[in-house]
Image (cartoon, rainbow, N blue to C red):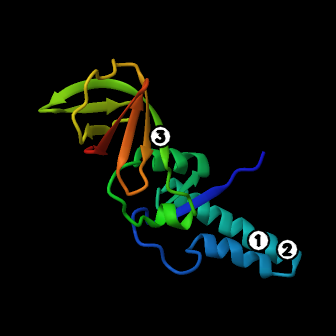
């Protein structure tokens, strides 16, 4: 089975040009032509990478985990996060979520969804869904969001 992996050094820091140690050390071993020297280089570089992972200075993340993190951020104010841009992850346009609770907020409603997101309707919403309902949250053409449940759809924005 093949896994796509992303190595994150200095998580949350801006991405620097080119591979970062210890990944650069591992990649440089490929240029060594002598078999014994190349093996020694790989052994040393692999040990350094393992130490960095154990010390949590480098984090290894698979693409599926990154996609889930991207989905959890769906609807939040966009930030140019190098973790997502370097991995070339597309911006999600749709999210399906289970409704945890509904609370009135004046003429609007607050929807708490599974995964921790809270959405507020931006127009009056009548006949709210019941907890446990499946919500479909979609990005609109002009930047807003729509929450659909049953045969109803209402404009909304993410507040948390």
Q: Is residue 9 left or right of residue 74?
A: right
Name the front one of labels 3 and 1: 3
**Where's residue 157, x and y in %?**
29, 45
Q: Which mark is residue 95?
A: 3
Observer-nearest residue: 23 or 48?
Answer: 23
Q: Earlier in the sequence, mark 3 or mark 1?
A: 1
- Quick check: 76 left or right of 85? left
The residue where tag 1 is placed is 40
Q: Earlier in the sequence, mark 2 or mark 3?
A: 2
Look at the numbered disc 2 and give the secondary structure of its residue: helix
Q: Are marks 1 and 2 in contact (CB under 8 Å)?
A: yes
Query: Looking at the rendered structure, which numbered label has been put on residue 135?
Result: none
Q: Local crowd at mark 3 within 10 Å, few (<14), some, or many (≥20)?
A: some
Q: CA distance from mark 1 to mark 2?
A: 6 Å
* Quadrant that contains the N terminus: top right
Q: Secondary structure at mark 1?
A: helix
The answer to whether the residues at label 3 and label 1 have Cβ atoms under 8 Å apart is no
**Residue drawn where x is 37% and y is 26% of the image:** 99
What's the residue at 26%, 38% (across, down)?
A: 121
């Amino acid at each position: 089975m093949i896994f796509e992996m992303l190595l994150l050094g200095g998580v949350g820091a801006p991405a620097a040009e080119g591979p970062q140690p210890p990944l650069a050390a591992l990649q440089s071993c490929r240029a060594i032509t002598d078999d014994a020297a190349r093996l020694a280089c790989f052994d040393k570089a692999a040990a350094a990478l393992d130490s960095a992972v154990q010390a949590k200075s480098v984090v290894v993340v698979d693409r599926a985990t990154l996609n889930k993190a991207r989905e959890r951020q769906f609807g939040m104010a966009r930030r140019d996060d190098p973790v997502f841009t370097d991995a070339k992850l597309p911006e999600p346009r749709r999210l399906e979520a289970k409704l945890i609770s509904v609370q009135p907020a004046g003429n609007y409603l607050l929807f708490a969804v599974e995964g921790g997101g809270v959405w507020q309707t931006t127009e009056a919403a009548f006949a709210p869904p019941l907890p446990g309902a499946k919500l479909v949250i979609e990005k609109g053409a002009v930047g807003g969001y729509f929450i659909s449940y049953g045969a109803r759809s209402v404009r909304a924005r993410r507040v948390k």
